[in-house]
Image (cartoon, rainbow, N blue to C red):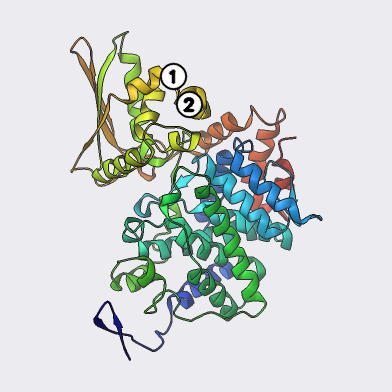
Amino acid sequence: MDVRRGGARRRVRRGRVNPTVAERLVAFAQEHARDGVPGDVRHEAKRLLLNQLKASVGATDHEVVRILNDWGGATGGYGKAQALWLGTRLEPARAAMVNGALFEVLDFHDTYIPCYMHATSAVLPAALAAAQSGGNSGREMVDALALGIEVELACARMLMPTGYYRGFVPAGLTGGVGAAAACSLLAGLDGERMRNALAIAMCTAFGTYESVGSMTLSYITGATAMSGLTAAELAGRGMDAPATAFEGDKGMRESYSDEPAEKIGEILDSLGKPWCIHGQSYKSVPTETITHAPIECALALLPRTKGREVARVRILVEPIVVDICDERMERFGDPHSELTARFDLCFCVAAAWRRGRFTLDEMREAAYTDPDILALRSRVELVRDETRESFDGCSMEVEFTDGTTESTSVDAFLGSPSRRMSDEELAAIFRAAAEPVLPAGRADEILAAVWDLDAAPDIDGMMSLCRLT
C-alpha cells in the first residue's frame, strides 16, 4: 500500500516481525524472573532503590509534590500504596505518580549517560506501588525493578540519542515500558498479556524537554510511572495492543527517533550481556549530571586559591554540554527559581565556589539571588572539548585578578561507572540527606531494611520506615 506524505510516496510495510520487539523483551524478563536475576544485578537494584530514597527524602516541601499529593488524596478512602516520606495512603496508580515526582524534583537520582536518562525514576514508583498493593515479597520487587530497568534501557538504546535530540525526555518515552514490565512480572501476567502491557506503554509514551525548569518535568516522571502501572493493570484485564508497537511503520521507533532499524536486533541479542543496570551513574550532589564534574573541579581548586579573587573560569566540556547550556541560557536567562537554578551549570559552579560546598541550600532563593554568586556566574565560560566523548569528565582553568592561574581536571565524577560509588559512600550520602529530616536512628533502620529487602516477606516493613514522622 502506498500513501503520500508531503507530496512524496512512502511505502507502508504490512506484516508481523516474528518475534516482535515486545515479545523478545517479555521472553528475556520472564526467563530471568523465573530463574532469578544474578546476585550482582539484584544488589545493584537495591543500590538504585537506596539512591532514590536519598533523592527524595528532602523533596517533600516542594510545591509540585504538594500539588500531586493533594491530587492523589482527592479521591478519598484508604489506598493500598504509600507516598514515600509523606505517609499518605493512595491508590497504587496515584502513589506511583507522587513517588515519581518525588524522585525527580531534586534531580538527585541516577543517570544512564549513554541515553541521557534517569532509568530508575519511573520504574521504581510503579514497582513499589504494585508490590505493596499486591503483597509481593521483597525479592520479587527487587527482581522486577532490575528487569524493568533492563527492559527500559533496551528500548532507550534503540531510540537514543536521536530521540533526545528531537526533544523528547528519554525516560518519558521508555520509562513506562520498563514500569509496565516490572508491574507485569509482579502481577504474574502470562506472556501474551505482558506483551500487551509493554505494547500499550509503547503506544502511549510522552514527554518533551521543553518541560525543563518547570514542575511539569517532575509530573512527566510521575505520569510515566502511573502510565506503566496502568498499562499492566489493563493488559491483565484483557486489553490488547499492536504486536509491532515498537518497530511498526508508525510505531515507537519511527515516531520518536531517527536511529537505524539495524540497532534493534543487535540490542535485543545483547540483553543481559552485560546487564546495563551496572552502567548507572549515582549523584553525590543534588543537581543534574552535566554539572557534577565541573562542581568536583571547583571544589578541588578552591583550597588552592589562597585569597585570590577570580577573574574568569573556563570549563572544557563535551560539546553537547555547551549546546544544552546555551539553549537554557537563551530560554531562562538568570536563574529565577530553584528549578531553573538546578539546570544552570554556570550557576552551580559559582554557587559551589562561593559556598565551598553544594547541597540543597545552594538551590534555595538565598543562593540563586545572591549577588556574589551571580557575579561569578557571569565569569564562567564553557568551552567545547572535541576530545571528550562523555560529560562524566571535564577540565577547569581558573584565572585570578592578579594574573595567576590554577587548573585541574576530572576524568570521571564520583558515582559514574568508571569511578563507582561504593555502598559505604552511597549510604553516607543517604544519611547526610535523611538525618536532618528523619527521627533519630531512622536512617540506619532504612539502610538495614533496604540491604535486607530481598529476604523480606513483603515491602511493608521498609515502606513503614520511609516516613518523616
**As rendered, which of 340 and 345 lies closer to the eye?**
340
Is 235 left, or right, of 20 in this rendering? Answer: right
> Measured from the top left, where is residue 423 in percent x and y?
52, 39
Q: In this view, does 319 lie above or below 273?
A: above
Seen from this angle, which residue lies furthest front?
Answer: 7
Q: Which mark is residue 362?
A: 2
Please state the total of marks drawn on the protein image.
2
Looking at the rendered structure, the kind of residue marked 1 is Arg
Q: Which residue is denoted by mark 1 in the rendering? A: 355
Seen from this angle, which residue lies furthest right?
Answer: 77
- Residue at 53 percent of width and 33 percent of height: 429
> Where on the picture, by quarter, is residue 293?
top left
**Tag 2–tag 1 contact (CB < 8 Å):** yes
For label 2, the SS is helix
Q: Which mark is residue 375?
A: none
Q: Which of marks 2 and 1 is nearer the N terminus?
A: 1
> Measured from the top left, where is residue 101 in percent x and y?
58, 48
- Residue at 68 percent of width and 47 percent of height: 69
> Measured from the top left, where is residue 304 in percent x and y?
31, 14
In this orientation, does residue 300 appear? no
Q: In this view, does 92 lie above or below 263?
A: above
Q: Is residue 359 above or below residue 267?
A: above
In this orientation, does residue 136 appear? yes
